[in-house]
Image (spheres, rainbow, N blue to C red):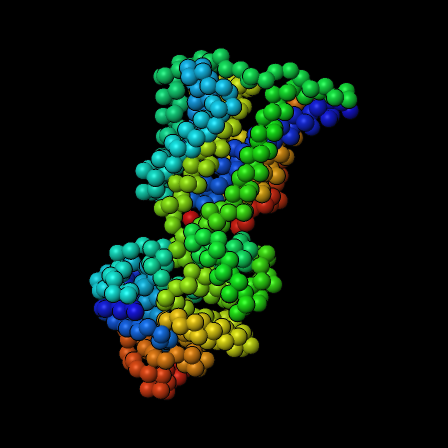
C-alpha cells in the first residue's frame, strides 16, 4: 500500500531522516517507535507532504506521490491525524469532522458523520461546541474522526497518546481498534511503546534519523521497550 | 428625540455599509493572511462599473449593481490566482502588490474617466417620514441590500461546505491542506468574494456619497479601523465593530459636530487597543 524508499529529510543543515525505507502492506498496523528526535514525525510528515524530502521515493498504491501537494495526497486516500491533535480550535466539533470530507457531497458527509458519531458518541454530544474547548483526549477523537471522514485507505497517526491520561490512552486504543476493524491500514508513531505495541502488527525502531530494527511485534517488542527507557 | 432616532437609523445604515467592506477585508486577512490594500480600489471600481453600466450600456440600476459585483469579484479572482498566489506567504510582497494594484486602479480610472466626479445619482429619491423622524429612502434601500448581503455572507460561511473549508483554512492552513482542503482552489474564491463585496458596496454607496478616482482611500482606512476594532480576521468582530463605528459616526456628527466624529472613533479604537490589544473579538495574534 505504502512504500518509502531511501528518503532524506533535512531541516537547514540538520539531517532528520537519512535513507529511510519502510513498507506498509494493506490491512497492517505498522508502528514507528523511538525517542524524541528519532525522525518518526519527519517520516509521517514526509508521507503526507507536510515536509519536503530530498531524494528517495514515496509510493502509495503503486503511484509515485513524491511530487504531489499535501492536499492531493490526502484526496488520494491518505488520512492524517497530526502530532498534538491540531484540531481547528475555532470550528465546531461537527465542522472539524466534516472538513475532512470537503467537497465530497452532503450525502457522504452525513453518512460519515453518522458512522463516526455512532463509534464515538462524543462527536454528536459536543457537535456544536468549538473543538478548542475540548480536553486533549476528546480532541484526539476529533482529530481521528476528521482524518477518517473521507474514508481513507491509509491512516497516519502521529503520537496519538501524546500528553494523555491513562484512561484516555485506553479509550484512544479502543478507537484505533475500531478503525482497524473497518479494514483501514494504519501507520502510527508513538513514544509510549507499551500501549502502542498492543495495537500494531509490525514495527520499525528508529533512532537518530535511521531505521535500526524492524520486524513483527513479537520480534521487536523487547527491543522497543528497552529503547523507550534509553 | 426625533434627531436621536434619525441619527440612529443613519448610523445603522452606515454600519451596514461598513460591515460589507469590513467583512471582505477581514475574510482575506483571516483566510489568506494577506492585508488587501487594494480593498478601497475595488470599492471605487464597483462604483465606476455600475456607473458605466447605467450610463453607457443603459442597464437598469439593480442589474448594474449585480454586474459591478461580478466584475470586481472576477478581477479579484484573477488577481489572486495569477499574482498574489505566488507570494501569498510573503507579507511584504503581498503588501506591495495590493498597494500597487490600488494605485493602478486609481490611475487607470483617472486615465479613462478623468479626475472629476461623474454624474451618478441614486435612482430612488425621497424621504420617509414616520412619527416625527425621517430617513432618506435611498439609505433605506442601501440598508436593506446590505443586510441581505451580510446575511448571505454569514450563510455562506457558516452553512455551506465551502464556508467550512474557508474557515478551516483560516484556522490552520498547513493542517487544513493535510486534510485535503485545496488552498489553490479556495484562496482565489475567497479573494473574489471579498472583492465582490467591496464592489457591491461601491456600486450601492457611491451614487449617494460621491464617485471619483480617489474615494477608495477613506474606505480602506475605515475598513482597516473597523477590522482592527473588531479583531483582525474575526467575522463577527467585523460586523459588530462596523455597526459600532456607524453609530458613533452618526451620533458624533449630530451631537459633537462633523470633524469631532473621526476623533471620537480614533479615541475609541485607541482605548480598545490598550484594553484589548487583539480587538473586541480577536484571538491571539496570528503567527507570521
Left/right of residue A9 with respect to residue B146 in the rendered view: left
Residue shown at the point (39%, 55%) measured from the top left:
B180
Closer to the camera in the image, A17 or B136:
B136
Q: Is residue B81 above or below residue B200?
A: below
Q: Is residue A139 above or below residue B182?
A: below
Rendering coords of residue B216 (x, y %): 47, 25
Left/right of residue B224 with respect to residue A182 in the rendered view: right
Q: How many marks?
A: 0
Closer to the camera in the image, B5 or B64:
B64
Rendering coords of residue B133 (x, y %): 74, 21
Residue A218 quadrant: bottom left
Residue B20 quadrant: top right
Q: In this view, does B277 lie above or below B218?
A: below
Rendering coords of residue A118 (x, y %): 54, 67
Rendering coords of residue B219 (x, y %): 51, 28
Question: Taking the image as drawn, is residue B263 in sight?
Answer: no
Q: Is residue B153 above or below residue A48?
A: above
Residue shown at the point (29%, 68%) measured from the top left:
A2
Question: Taking the image as drawn, is residue B158 in sight?
Answer: yes
Q: Quadrant of the N terminus of chain B?
A: top right
Residue shown at the point (54%, 30%) measured from the top left:
B222
Left/right of residue A91 with respect to residue A227 in the rendered view: right
Residue at the farthest front position: A107
Residue shown at the point (41%, 41%) measured from the top left:
B189
Residue A82 quadrant: bottom left
Amino acid at each position: 500500500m505504502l512504500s518509502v524508499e531511501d528518503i532524506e529529510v533535512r531541516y537547514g543543515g540538520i539531517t532528520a531522516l537519512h535513507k529511510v525505507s519502510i513498507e506498509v502492506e494493506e490491512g497492517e498496523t505498522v508502528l514507528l517507535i523511538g525517542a524524541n528526535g528519532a525522525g518518526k514525525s519527519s517520516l509521517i510528515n514526509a508521507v503526507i507532504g507536510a515536509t519536503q524530502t530530498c531524494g528517495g521515493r514515496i509510493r502509495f498504491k503503486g503511484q509515485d506521490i513524491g511530487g504531489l501537494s499535501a492536499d492531493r495526497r490526502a484526496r488520494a486516500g491518505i488520512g492524517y491525524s497530526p502530532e498534538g491533535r491540531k484540531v481547528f480550535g475555532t470550528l465546531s466539533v461537527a465542522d472539524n469532522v466534516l472538513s475532512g470530507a470537503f467537497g465530497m457531497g452532503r450525502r457522504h458527509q452525513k453518512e460519515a458523520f453518522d458512522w463516526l458519531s455512532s463509534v464515538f458518541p462524543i462527536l454528536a454530544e459536543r457537535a456544536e461546541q468549538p473543538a478548542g474547548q475540548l480536553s486533549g483526549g476528546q480532541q484526539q477523537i476529533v482529530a481521528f474522526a476528521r482524518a477518517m471522514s473521507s474514508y481513507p485507505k491509509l491512516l497516519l497517526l502521529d503520537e496519538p497518546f501524546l500528553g494523555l491520561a491513562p484512561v484516555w490512552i485506553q479509550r484512544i486504543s479502543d478507537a484505533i481498534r475500531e478503525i482497524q476493524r473497518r479494514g483501514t491500514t494504519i501507520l502510527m508513531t508513538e513514544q509510549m511503546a507499551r500501549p502502542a505495541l498492543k495495537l500494531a502488527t509490525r514495527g520499525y525502531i528508529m533512532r537518530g534519523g535511521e531505521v535500526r530494527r524492524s520486524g513483527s511485534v513479537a520480534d521487536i517488542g523487547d527491543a522497543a521497550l528497552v529503547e523507550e527507557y534509553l | 428625540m426625533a434627531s436621536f432616532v434619525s441619527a440612529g437609523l443613519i448610523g445603522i445604515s452606515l454600519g451596514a455599509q461598513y460591515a460589507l467592506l469590513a467583512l471582505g477585508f477581514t475574510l482575506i486577512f483571516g483566510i489568506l493572511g494577506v492585508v488587501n490594500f487594494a480593498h478601497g480600489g475595488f470599492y471605487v471600481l464597483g462604483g465606476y462599473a455600475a456607473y458605466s453600466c447605467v450610463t453607457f450600456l443603459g442597464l437598469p440600476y439593480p442589474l448594474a449593481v449585480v454586474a459591478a459585483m461580478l466584475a470586481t469579484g472576477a478581477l479579484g479572482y484573477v488577481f489572486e490566482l495569477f499574482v498574489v498566489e505566488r507570494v501569498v506567504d510573503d507579507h511584504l510582497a503581498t503588501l506591495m502588490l495590493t498597494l500597487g494594484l490600488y494605485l493602478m486602479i486609481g490611475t487607470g480610472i483617472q486615465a479613462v474617466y478623468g479626475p472629476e466626479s461623474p454624474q451618478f445619482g441614486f435612482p430612488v429619491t425621497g424621504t420617509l417620514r414616520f412619527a416625527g423622524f425621517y430617513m432618506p429612502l435611498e439609505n433605506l434601500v442601501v440598508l436593506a441590500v446590505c443586510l441581505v448581503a451580510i446575511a448571505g455572507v454569514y450563510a455562506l460561511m457558516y452553512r455551506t461546505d465551502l464556508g467550512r473549508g474557508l474557515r478551516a483554512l483560516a484556522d490552520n492552513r498547513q493542517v487544513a491542506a493535510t486534510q485535503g482542503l485545496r488552498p489553490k482552489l479556495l484562496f482565489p474564491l475567497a479573494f473574489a468574494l471579498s472583492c465582490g463585496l467591496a464592489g457591491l458596496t461601491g456600486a450601492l454607496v457611491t451614487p449617494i456619497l460621491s464617485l471619483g478616482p480617489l474615494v477608495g482611500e477613506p474606505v480602506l482606512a475605515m475598513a482597516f479601523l473597523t477590522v482592527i476594532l473588531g479583531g483582525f480576521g474575526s467575522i463577527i468582530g467585523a460586523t459588530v465593530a462596523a455597526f459600532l463605528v456607524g453609530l458613533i459616526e452618526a451620533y458624533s456628527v449630530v451631537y459633537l459636530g462633523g470633524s469631532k466624529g473621526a476623533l471620537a472613533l480614533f479615541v475609541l479604537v485607541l482605548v480598545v487597543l490598550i484594553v484589548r490589544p487583539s480587538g473586541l473579538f480577536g484571538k491571539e495574534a496570528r503567527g507570521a
